[in-house]
Amino acid sequence: MGGKQPERDVGEPLMLTYREAAAKIGISLRWLYVLMKKGEIHSLDLGGQVRRIRTSECQAYVDRLVAEQIGEAS
């Protein structure tokens, strides 16, 4: 009793740091900041100086890019 609990695999995180989000999308941190400034990617304020980007926000950005480029090809 009272021993250390084994860590559980909780799967993919729901929120990412800026660096993690940039890596997940496959872009530079600098480009991520540009996209955020343009309003193409949004972050959440968790209080203090902590901000995170939802993994779904990363996926939505990539999905929009794909849709735009497929539309251009037709």
Image (cartoon, rainbow, N blue to C red):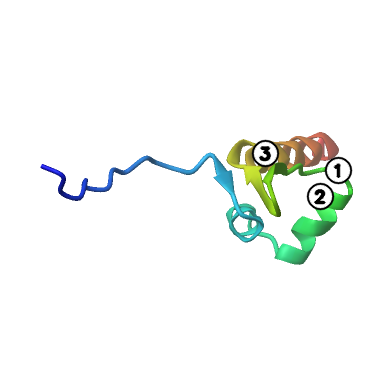
Q: Is residue 68 left or right of residue 9?
A: right
Residue position for label 3: 57
Q: Identity of the amino acid at label 3?
A: Glu
What residue is drawn where x is 68% and y is 45%? 47
Q: Which element is circle 1 on? A: loop
User: Looking at the picture, which amino acid does disc 1 mark?
Assistant: Gly
Asked which quadrant contains residue 46, the reply is: top right
Q: Which residue corresponds to the image point at 69% horizontal and 51% vertical from the top-left?
A: 48
Circles 1, 2 touching at the beta carbon (< 8 Å): yes
Which residue is at 84% across, 57% downward?
A: 34
Question: Which residue sits furthest front?
Answer: 2
Q: Which residue is mark 2?
A: 36
Residue depicted at 72% across the width and 41% down the height: 61
Where is residue 60 drawn, in percent x and y?
Answer: 68, 36
Q: Is residue 19 left or right of residue 68?
A: left
Location of mark 1 (residue): 39
Q: Amino acid at mark 2?
A: Met
Is residue 22 shown left or right of residue 69?
A: left
Could you tell me which quadrant the C terminus lies in? top right
